[in-house]
Image (cartoon, rainbow, N blue to C red):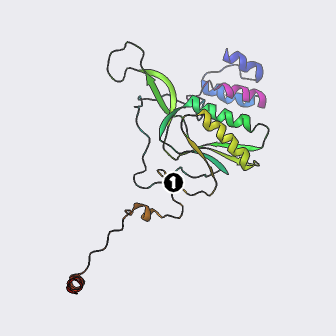
Amino acid sequence: MTANYLSRISPLPKRISTWSTLIRSSRYASADSRGLLFSWRGFSSTAYNFGNWLLPTQHEAKKSRKGRPRVPTGGSSRGTTVMWGDFGLRMCDHHRRIPSSALKIGEDAIKVRLKGMRYRLYKRVCANIGVYTKGNEVRMGKGKGSFDHWASRIAVSKIIFEIKGDIHEQVARDAFRLAGNKMPGKYEFVKKGDPPVVGITALNGISLEELKRPRRKVPLPMPPLRLAEASGSASTSSRI
């Protein structure tokens, strides 16, 4: 069937001994027929890239556990500021696992509100964690659940959406408000240039060293000479 199809679109030789000859003969085809031929990719061992930010290209080789999002114990503020856009939507209450359906609903809410405007929407997260569920009346034990949906682990103060374009700030606030109302969790509106956040603490003029320092400043240990002078002055004042 393939040889008959190629014979109609290109002047092939009468005898085709190997598949390499067949591929070389396709060079004589026109541009349109060549594009149609290679769009089929019958001789390729690679797969099409059907994935997107809500649907990975391939399924997981190993089942993902429920897990927990990362906790910035070392003071990391990665992913808490607006990078590419002008405005952003940031989670501000607690880390959680959000399904891809909820992320899609939030994206659709933003697109409906900004319909007809010139903008670009950036997604800072991706649903790459598989969620597996078990049916009713199933015996106890782990690892027996079947695949249910894709989800994303989102840490606290993580930017989810960003918008860049000729859009007023109030319009962007309204679009993010609609998206936040339709997704689980509590969100806040941020702008380009806002300070980063460690956990739920905004680093507005605070350095990382000051953040790691304890709240009560511990006095430095005094030298023995000064310690003796301080004790002597204290005894003198008590006598007076």
The residue type indicated by label 1 comes to: Val
Residue at the extreme front of the image, as rendered: 240
Q: Is residue 25 left or right of residue 225?
A: right
- Of helix, strand and loop, which one carries label 1? strand
Q: Is residue 162 above or below residue 61?
A: below
- Quadrant of residue 123 within the rendered picture: top right
Q: Is residue 210 left or right of residue 165?
A: left
In the image, 19 versus 184, the foreground residue is 184
Bounds of the magenta span?
30-46
**In the rendering, at what x and y percent does residue 63 appear?**
41, 28
**In the rendering, at what x and y percent does residue 188 appear?**
59, 46
Q: Is residue 107 left or right of residue 11?
A: left
**In the rendering, at what x and y percent does residue 26 appear?**
70, 28
Q: How many numbered badges does the structure rendering display?
A: 1
Magenta run includes residue 158: no
In the image, 126 versus 67, the foreground residue is 67
Quadrant where the C terminus sits is bottom left
Residue for badge 1: 197
Q: Residue at x 70, y 45 (%)?
A: 172
Residue 104 in view (yes/no): yes
